[in-house]
Amino acid sequence: MPQNGKIVGIDVSKRQVEGCLRSPLERLSAANTPQGRQQLIAWLRQREVTLAVMEASGGYERDWAEALGAAGIAVKIVDPKRVRYFAKSAGRLAKNDPIDAAMIAWFAETFAAEAAPADDPERALIDRLTTARALLVRLESQVGQLVEHRQPALVARAQQAIARTIGVQRRRLEAAITAKIEAHAPFARRREIIESVPGLGPRFAAGAIAWLPELGQIGNKPAAALVGIAPYDDDSGARHGERHIKGGRREIRDLLYMATLAATRCNPPIKAHYRQLRARGKSFKVALVACMRKLIVILNTMLRQDHKWNPCAAPVAAPVLA
């Protein structure tokens, strides 16, 4: 728990939020409106709350996080699955908004020592722009698949018009993302370092800035775990199961997958590693995931050391840290 303060668990829904303090037990319901946010902030200040923890809830949490951060209350957004698994492990099967707020507060107190990225409104804006761009890319792909098939003339014209509109809006978002990154010196430097790596381009750089802010500030094993490419043991007694990757942040993992495909062709250390694994009989998927892990470790080391790509040092510049 933060020193000289309390932790509040907040459950955010479309129309209202539930706040819960556990010691002593106190609750507050507020409307999901600007007035409701001010009501909750005043309530938290009276109780000297210093940390608010809430689940990611499809974007409904963003306005609350911004308002709380502006009021000087630290905010931590956690994965809803972790809170739900925590509740199940405690035998708490019932679920409603007040119960959820209480479980978030209990979870937050239990894992209070976990570090959370500092609140950064500039990064949050790039996150929103990058997320919106990713949505348009998916829509563009779906419309493109429809255009491939023969359609009545009216339908074909409608699809073509939609595809043009999506393309225009996607390019506008890309220009805005580039401008925001260039206007922020630390982000511009991160982009420069990331894009110096063969195979990593502007799209991956923007995604790493938006969705993986911890990169360069944590060890290599946690970095791989955050992306979801860290192998986990599946052993019990004398049985030794096959290790599997699991969890992590899908958005940045998808970008890293595509970047690694390019790197296996144009990045000499990654290309050599991939070929070596394949020559040893590893499947395409296993070899590619191993290359993804090697690439994220190299990139994590580069950002930590504030160094651009050095092909001579790259194979040895990736120590595995706890």
Image (spheres, rainbow, N blue to C red):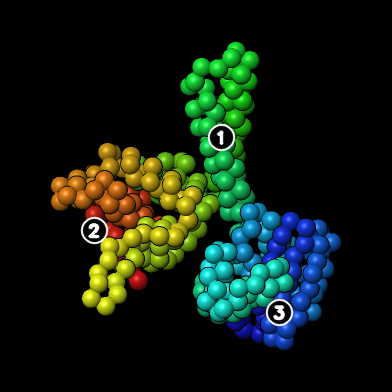
Q: Does residue 156 appear left or right of residue 238 in this picture?
A: right
**Image quadrant in which you'd find residue 140:** top right
Marks 1 and 3, how far apart at CA: 42 Å
Query: Which circle's residue, 3 or 2, is located before the other in the chain?
Result: 3
Q: Real-space Cα distance between discs 2 and 1?
A: 41 Å
Q: Look at the picture and state if 97 lies above or below 57.
A: below
246 relative to 144, above or below: below
Comparing 237 with 182, the one in front is 237
What amino acid is at disc 1?
Leu
Q: Could you say which disc has been placed on residue 21 in the image?
A: 3
Q: Residue furthest bottom?
A: 24
Hey, which residue is sitting farthest top in the picture?
A: 153
| Residue at 62 percent of width and 84 percent of height | 3
Q: Earlier in the sequence, mark 2 or mark 1?
A: 1
Neighbour class for label 2 at 10 Å: few (<14), some, many (≥20)?
A: few
Percent coordinates x, y for residue 128 in the rendering: 61, 48
Instruction: Classify the position of the C terminus by image quarter.
Output: bottom left
Residue tagged by mark 2?
316
